[in-house]
Image (cartoon, rainbow, N blue to C red):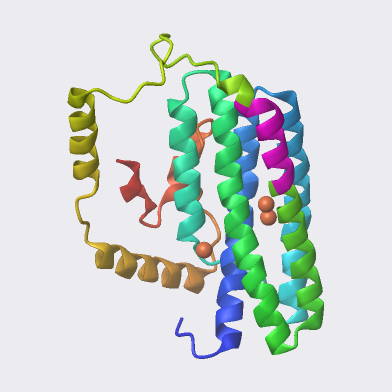
Amino acid sequence: MAMKSLHDLFVHTLRDIYHAEKQGLKAMRQMSRKVTSPELKSLLETHHEETEHQVEELEHVFESLSMRPRGTNCEAVHGLLEEARELMEEAADDRTRDAGIVAAVQAVEHYEIARYGTLVAWGEALGHSDAVEALRRIRDQEMATDQKLSELAEDTLNPAADTGEGEDGGATDGTAPTQVEAEAIEEETAEQDEPVDAMADVKENAELADAEQEDGEDEGVVDLGEERSGRSGKRGKGRGKRAA
Ligand code: FE
Ligand code: FE
Ligand code: FE
């Protein structure tokens, strides 16, 4: 969709965050199953409930603009959830995983805060006062969640994860890497930094978003582990290429 005005940007971003919230709902449920800390589990469950209401609020925002609620693919949240999935797979123990899950959820919260901040500003400029009120309410909820996650991590989860035991069970001594290790790290980093054809992705994503606009579909989620077999068919839409 060509964007020619602030209104177009506003609608596009509203669809983006609507899609992101729905992905977040599925992801939070999957993540909370992998959480060990009861406090973190309850925090995620509470935010899951809040998010269900946020989705409804967003639907009311669409309606207040005489539009049908519809999502458009949010690559950012797919990327963040893909990172979350990797992190959960790689965490070697429960406490490390809990600390990592907090960081993963906070990355999504920060994305949401950025998007709602923009939507509030654009909504104000466009004079959508009802929408602005709802968007501000959601943004405040995201900020409060982010704050609670920080407190839980700093007070409890980070100290618990800081046991000094690595994956191999050996204590880390906190010393700098040896020359050989440093070279290995450097090599690894150099490999990862190889340039990719960024434009190819941009083009493909634009096509994806357009395709999704046309059929109004709002499916497809980065699977965080448990529902892989049943869900794989729904990933479609070119996101399969990331499965490698
Ligand atoms: Fe949200
Ligand atoms: Fe997005
Ligand atoms: Fe949130």
Q: Residue at x 18, y 31 (%)?
A: 183
* Ligand 1 positioned in quadrant: bottom right
Q: Quadrant of the C terminus?
A: top left
Question: 51 or 220, which is in the foreground?
Answer: 51
Q: How many marks?
A: 0
Is 18 contained in the magenta span?
no
Q: Residue at x 70, y 81 (%)?
A: 123
What predominant SS class does the magenta segment belong to?
Answer: helix
Magenta residues, start to end: 147-158
Residue sticking out furthest to the top: 170
- On screen, 133 above or below 85? below
Is 154 contained in the magenta span?
yes
Q: Is residue 244 left or right of residue 22?
A: left
Spot occupied by residue 157 in the image (x, y as percentages of width and height) = 65, 27
Can residue 177 be seen by looking at this rendering? Answer: yes
Spot occupied by residue 35 in the image (x, y as percentages of width and height) = 63, 27
User: Which of the 4 image quadrants contains residue 169?
Assistant: top left
- On screen, 68 above or below 45? below
Q: Residue at x 55, y 60 (%)?
A: 218
- On screen, 222 above or below 13? above
- On screen, 212 above or below 12? above
Can residue 229 be seen by looking at this rendering? Answer: no
Spot occupied by residue 159 in the image (x, y as percentages of width and height) = 62, 23
Q: Residue at x 34, y 47 (%)?
A: 242
Spot occupied by residue 81 in the image (x, y as percentages of width and height) = 50, 45
Q: Is residue 244 left or right of residue 150?
A: left
Residue sticking out furthest to the front: 175
User: Which of the 4 image quadrants contains residue 202?
Assistant: bottom left
User: Which of the 4 image quadrants contains residue 134?
Assistant: bottom right
Question: 142 or 159, which is in the foreground?
Answer: 159
